[in-house]
Image: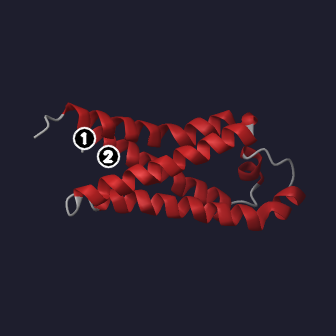
Amino acid sequence: MSTATKFFAALAGVIHVLFFLMESVFWTNPTVFQIFTVANAVDADTMAVFIKNQGFYNLFLALGMFAGLALLTRSPVVARTLITYISLVMMGASIVLLFTLPAMLNGVFIQGLPPLLALLMLQFGRASRPTA
């Protein structure tokens, strides 16, 4: 697996850890909830339980990506499969965000671009190897 693939996969994981922190740890901070287009503390409090759950989904996606990276030397096929699957889920979530909240276009790119690049690098890395 190329260094670029590993970099974008790790970046996607780190970004999802940051989403976890914003959604599950720092949600009540106005600077944080306003990033997610929530206007006031009352609305943020109303959403808090759902957002915390979403934050943990993001943490579990990040952990899945990190597990895939950690398995590269031990089990490359499992690692590639896990990185591919987690990347596709992250991209799927960014597409859902695009269609449900178009005002969060920056979030779509922040969430979806690193896993897309990891997948492209993974595919190009496989395509450039000679077949046996």
Q: Are marks 2 and 1 in contact (CB under 8 Å)?
A: yes
Q: Quadrant of the N terminus?
A: top left
**Residue at the outermost front position:** 132
**Disc on res. 77:** none
Q: Position of residue 21 (x, y in %)?
A: 60, 60
Q: Residue at x 13, y 34 (%)?
A: 130
Looking at numbered disc 1 in the image, what kind of residue is underneath it? Ser
Q: Nearer the viewer, residue 80 or 37?
A: 80
Q: Nearer the viewer, residue 87 or 34?
A: 87
The quarter of the displayed image where residue 63 is located: bottom left
Q: Residue at x 39, y 49 (%)?
A: 84
Mark 2–mark 1 Cα distance, whole angstroms, equals 6 Å
**Disc on res. 6:** 2
**Residue at the outermost right position:** 42
Give the class, few, some or many, for how many residues have Cα within 10 Å of label 1's Cα (few <14, many ≥20).
Answer: few
40 with respect to 73 (left or right): right
Q: Position of residue 124 (x, y in %)?
A: 29, 33
Q: How is the image coloured?
A: secondary structure
**Label total for image:** 2
Q: Position of residue 37 (x, y in %)?
A: 78, 44
Classify mark 2: helix, strand or loop: helix
**Disc on res. 2:** 1
1 with respect to 15 (left or right): left
Q: Quadrant of the C terminus?
A: top left
The quarter of the displayed image where residue 3 is located: top left
Looking at numbered disc 2 in the image, what kind of residue is underneath it? Lys
66 with respect to 50 (left or right): left
Q: Nearer the viewer, residue 8 or 29?
A: 8
